[in-house]
Amino acid sequence: MSEYKGAPALDAGLVAAAQAVEHYEIARYGTLIVWAEQLGMSEAAELLKTTLSEEELTDEALSALGESGVNERAMQQAA
Ligand SMILES: [Fe+2]
């Protein structure tokens, strides 16, 4: 990261890494919701659904950030 300090490629990499974390969380919450429902834990399932929705919104925000020019600037610098 220090080699890319201030570089557009670092921004693009950070967005990509953050989005990978969100995808992992979305997958895990999806599984936990199913398990909670199968165990009859409806209150827990609803709480998990709320959290899943928050993760999905963050994922969408990160996609928008990447598409807003972060990725393009990184590619321009590389060219
Ligand atoms: Fe998250």
Image (cartoon, rainbow, N blue to C red):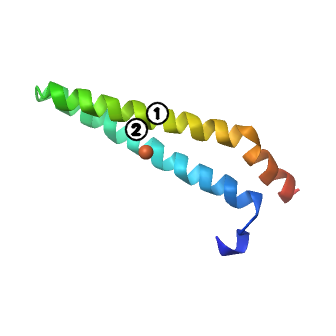
| Amino acid of disc 1 | Glu
Q: Which residue is mark 1?
A: 56
Q: Amino acid at mark 2?
A: Ile
Q: Quadrant of the C terminus?
A: bottom right
Image quadrant where one finds the N terminus:
bottom right
User: Is 76 displayed left or right of 50 in the figure?
Assistant: right
* Vertical placement of residue 78 versus 31, above or below: below
x, y percentage for residue 49? Answer: 31, 29
In the orientation shown, which residue stands out farthest toward the right?
A: 79
The label on residue 71 is none
| Local crowd size for mark 2, using a 10 Å CA cut-off: few (<14), some (14–19), many (≥20) | some
Q: Where residue 65 sits: x, y (%)?
A: 66, 41
Instruction: Tell me the quarter of the picture where residue 60 sits.
Output: top right
Q: Earlier in the sequence, mark 2 or mark 1?
A: 2
Residue at 10% across / 25% down in the picture?
Answer: 40
Q: Is residue 49 left or right of residue 71?
A: left
Look at 46% across and 33% down and name the residue there: 56
Secondary structure, mark 1, is helix
Element type at marker 2? helix
Q: Is the CB of mark 1 within 8 Å of ligand 1?
A: no
In which image quadrant can residue 28 be found? top left
Q: Are marks 2 and 1 in contact (CB under 8 Å)?
A: yes
Percent across and percent down for residue 25 are: 39, 43
Q: Which residue is tagged 2?
A: 26
